[in-house]
Image (cartoon, grey):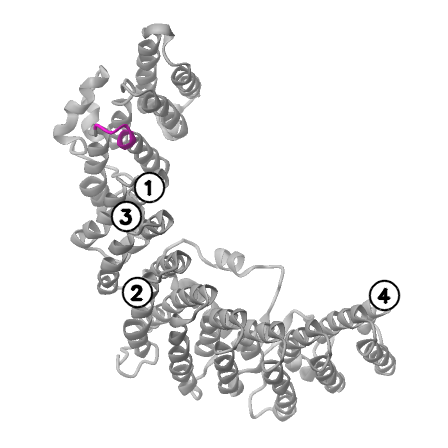
Amino acid sequence: VTACSLGPVLWGHLDFPHQLQLRGVITRALHDVEVIVRKSTATVLHEIAELVFDPRAVPWLVLMCERAMTDPEPQLRAAAMTLTWHLAEHLPNAFYGDASKGSRSLRRLPPRSDPTFAEVYLLQCKLLPVATRLGEDRAPSVRLAVAAQCDRLANALGEHWYSVIIDLLLALLVDADERVRSEATLCVPRLVESVLLGTTNEGAPNSVTVLESLLPVAIKLIKDSSTTVRVSLATASGELLTLLVGLQSLEALSSQVDGIVENPNTSRFVRHKRHIDDTLIPLVQRLLHDKDPEVTSSALRAVTNASRGNVREISSRQQRQRKLSAETNTIIDDDTVSLSSLHSVERRDPVFIPVLSEQQVLRLLPTLSDLANSPQWRVRQSAVEIVPALLGCTHRLETRSEIAQLCIKLMGDAVDAVRRTAAECLCLGGGSLGGHGNGEDGEWVTAIVIPHLLACTNSASCKQRLLSLKMVEVLLTNGVFPLETSGKLLGSNTSLLASSSLDVTDSSLSSNPLREILEIAGSLSLDRIVNVRLNVGRVLGNVITMLEEEELMYVVQVLENQVNFESEQEGGGDRDVIYFAKKTLAIAQERLEEPGLSSI
């Protein structure tokens, strides 16, 4: 094992005759009687595949793949799949023979006109049967490894072999083992993305074939007896929704930038719209009605993720591939940098482009409303969590009001976690509209959120009054409130504040929405229920760092009155209420003493 582990270290420092000797050592190790030695050798081969810049070593590596494929140990055969796509990925490097940019610099497959194309193609012809044979392996764990890596194999081999790999995944989708079917289902959107983004104009039929081949088989899995498979199907459906509409939106944006008028009937990405409307949306709707709550929750998460779809990631990948292809014909593959980190560097602003259209959202609403009546409280909670994402897909207040009914209905749920989630999603709905306090999100808060906030504050139920404090906290913590008002937030409900025995006649109230929302919380400072009074101090303490001088002075006034009220009660009042009030008072007074606070 130790001798084998030195292989990658020595490889780059040896001339070809000595590399032959090292190859003999590694070959013998791969035939060793001890399983642990053969496993270590498979890892060594994986590392050496990155270091090969001499085409004379490639046939030996292909032979090692074939040897690992026939190993009696399933883990070794599964490792053969990883080695296969990894070697295929580095084949062009070996034939170009340029090690100046290191092993992380992956060259693309040479064009057909290149003299090396035939050699690379012939070696691919030897590697692909390794993957297809492993896909028929008797051990489920080996077939599972193939199912999980079909997309990587497609990326490595190129579009010449897309149809073969699609057929391989189709066979795995109907595998006898549920784990293999589940993994193959999760691979479907990844393979579709590889084919759609990797297909040139000459290979355009592949981009249609991949959907027309995979979707009918995947849809049949909705009747699969395994919950795990149906959960994977829900996840894959959401990823496909995001991908297909993202590509469609990206093409539309690219056409506008380039000044090109696309024919909707000929654009290959626009043609995918029928797959969305006729296949994926109905599929998700059926999954939302699944008898297993785990599947239903997974389908809800899929719709949420699809509603928040972002075509910037697809755009950045396409642009990066084209740029690298044009300039250096290489792809930089650095495993130390995650895709999310790379995307966060490339994106300057976190703008989400909605995936679902308003018509598609309206089609989903009846299904989501039915889920709000589910006897499973986690399903009801998942149903309402989708609201902020759906709101970003429409600009009509009437549609947004209909979506809001999901939240409003569940704000009266018997389960506290459901009520709090519903209230939070109702408040955060404005943030999905991208107005930053003006326009649509200001309209949302003023027309939808505030009336229900006041209704909760006026409710005879202490649970609803506690919920109103949660809403105040969410609004202020996330900055989701209109920047300007005309004294209409409270409107005729200013009588609500009279019970707090506070002076609310300040003329600044009519132009300070933050102050008005604070007053809603302050009105509960003398509530008859101890737990409500306690949470006033707690909530104000959580938002205190976001307040300016005027609001801080108001908070001090509210809490001082609350402390005096508690002190006058029999037995000195509730000590927890006093504790949170004094704690927040201390923070507020400390902030008031900060220099330059009034200029914030």
Total labels: the figure holds 4
Q: CA distance from mark 1 to mark 3?
A: 18 Å
Separation of marks 3 and 2 at Cα, in angstroms: 31 Å
**What's the residue at 75%, 70% (across, down)?**
39
Residue 387, how many percent across, how many down?
30, 51
Number of residues whose C-alpha sits closer than 10 Å to that of mark 4, classed few (under 14), some (14–19) or many (20 or more): few
Q: Main secondary structure of the magenta part?
A: helix
From where the camera sits, is residue 417 visible? Answer: yes
Residues drawn in magenta: 460-465
User: Mark 4 — residue?
Assistant: 2
Whole-Å distance between the Cαs marked 4 and 2? 55 Å
Q: Nearer the viewer, residue 575 or 361?
A: 575
- Figure quadrant of the C terminus: top left
Q: Amino acid at mark 3?
A: Gly
* 523 to the left or right of 303: left
- The answer to the question of whether label 1 and label 4 lie on touching residues, with beta carbons closer than 8 A, is no
Question: Tag 4: residue type?
Answer: Thr
Q: Residues within 10 Å of mark 1 (few under 14, many from 20)?
A: many
Checking the image for residue 424, the label placed there is 1
Task: Read off the residue under disc 2.
Answer: 285
In this rendering, the label closer to the viewer, 3 or 4: 4
